[in-house]
């Protein structure tokens, strides 16, 4: 009897294992049959995989005016895939069907001769780098379904002068419009809550920023952009022609690259309330010669990394009593910097934290006049 029970249990265990693995095979087969990999379809000008337009054929790359079909091989096209039109040099105009809801990363990257693209009103997703380097693109209307302009989306679109934002845009990402030099006026709607670093850096044609009066996050004063509370100076309009500018009292931070590549200013008087200069704040300001920080009343604590990098004509600068940190490369290539007007005691000067001293030698080796 005991042997019989052991034999029975052995047979039962074997049957259970066999059933388990057979079941797994059936499940795997079911999954593979239900979700087959989509084949790549090639038609005259385009390649597609399922609902995604993946690229251009050899003949497609010869087109100047592209009309994307709504269906390919009977399948509705909903997505312009990653790098689908990457570096397509011949294209001048593109028309997208209403079926398109998504444009993926680098979809039109480097289409440098494309002057016009008609976007579907149904698009609700626009990925980063999508139009990078489309240097002939002149205008674009962002579809209403888009709530965020992602990083680098329109970077170096050098002819882009007219962008229509929908009212629900909440964020503009890093370098989203960097080097869009044809911009003359940048208007921020009240819906925009976040401007990431470098969003409008090197937009040298901007004469003024403007903001909806009911914005809770930003405001413009004399065409320059500030945080709503006035504590952060975000952007100086680079196409201004003034030689002198005074940062108003109440500002505490000069933002990331806020004056970078400004070509006209010779003197900047920074308010005594300012505590820190952001990364590349005055980088490559080619005619900047004199910078003051409010003298003995200054609260400046930090000069950020590369703050005056390549400010080749910078001649003199103040070192307030409150200054404690100078970032790496802050004064690199400031070949004419020769005078520092210091409110620091000699002991405080000696204890000043200076990153990469060799690269800030123009600052440390300048003629220092100490005010006591």
Image (cartoon, rainbow, N blue to C red):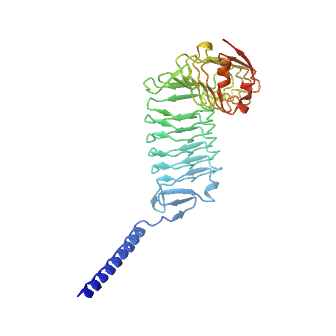
| Residue 143 on image: x %, y % | 47, 41
- So how many labels did they put on this image? 0
Asked if residue 211 can be seen in this view, the reply is yes
Work out which quarter of the rendered image holds the N terminus and state it.
bottom left
Residue 330 against residue 155 in the figure, above or below = above
Figure quadrant of residue 201: top right
Asked if residue 267 can be seen in this view, the reply is no
Q: In the drawing, does residue 70 fall left or right of residue 342?
A: left
The answer to which of 227 and 316 lies nearer the viewer is: 316
- Residue extending farthest to the top is 372
Q: Residue at x 54, y 49 (%)?
A: 105
Q: In the drawing, does residue 322 fall left or right of residue 73?
A: right
Work out which quarter of the rendered image holds the C terminus and state it.
top right
Q: Residue at x 48, y 49 (%)?
A: 102
| Residue 155 on image: x %, y % | 60, 40
Residue 21 against residue 83 in the figure, above or below = below
The answer to which of 184 and 223 lies nearer the viewer is: 223
Figure quadrant of residue 54: bottom right
Q: Residue at x 57, y 56 (%)?
A: 55
| Residue 348 on image: x %, y % | 64, 21
């Amino acid at each position: 009897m005991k042997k019989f029970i052991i034999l029975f249990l052995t047979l039962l265990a074997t049957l259970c294992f066999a059933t388990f693995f057979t079941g797994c095979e059936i499940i795997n087969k079911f999954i593979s049959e239900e979700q087959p990999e989509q084949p790549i379809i090639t038609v005259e000008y385009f390649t597609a995989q399922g609902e995604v337009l993946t690229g251009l054929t050899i003949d497609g790359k010869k087109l100047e005016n592209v009309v994307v079909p709504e269906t390919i091989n009977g399948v509705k096209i909903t997505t312009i895939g990653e790098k689908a039109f990457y570096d397509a040099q011949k294209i001048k105009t593109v028309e997208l069907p209403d079926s398109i809801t998504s444009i993926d990363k680098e979809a039109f990257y480097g289409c440098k001769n494309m002057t016009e693209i008609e976007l579907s009103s149904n698009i609700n997703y626009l990925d980063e780098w999508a139009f990078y380097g489309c240097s002939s693109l002149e205008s674009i209307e962002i579809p209403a379904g888009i709530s965020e302009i992602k990083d680098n989306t329109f970077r170096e679109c050098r002819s882009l002068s007219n962008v229509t934002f929908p009212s629900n845009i909440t964020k503009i990402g890093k370098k989203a419009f960097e080097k869009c030099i044809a911009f003359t006026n940048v208007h921020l709607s009240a819906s925009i809550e976040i401007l990431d670093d470098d969003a409008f850096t090197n937009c040298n044609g901007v004469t003024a920023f403007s903001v909806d009066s009911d914005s809770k996050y930003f405001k413009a004063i004399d065409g320059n952009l500030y945080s709503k509370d006035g504590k952060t100076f975000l952007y100086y309009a680079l196409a201004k022609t003034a030689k002198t500018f005074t940062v108003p009292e109440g500002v505490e931070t000069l933002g990331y690259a806020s004056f970078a590549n400004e070509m006209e200013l010779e003197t900047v008087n920074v308010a005594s309330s300012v505590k820190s200069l952001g990364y590349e704040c005055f980088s490559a300001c080619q005619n900047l010669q004199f910078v003051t920080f409010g003298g003995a009343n200054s609260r400046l604590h930090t000069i950020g990394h590369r703050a005056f990098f390549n400010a080749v004509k910078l001649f003199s600068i103040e070192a307030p009593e409150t200054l404690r940190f100078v970032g790496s490369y802050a004064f690199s290539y400031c070949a004419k910097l020769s005078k520092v007007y210091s409110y620091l005691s000699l002991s405080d000067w000696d204890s000043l934290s200076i990153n990469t001293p060799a690269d800030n030698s123009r600052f440390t080796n300048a003629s220092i006049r100490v005010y006591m």
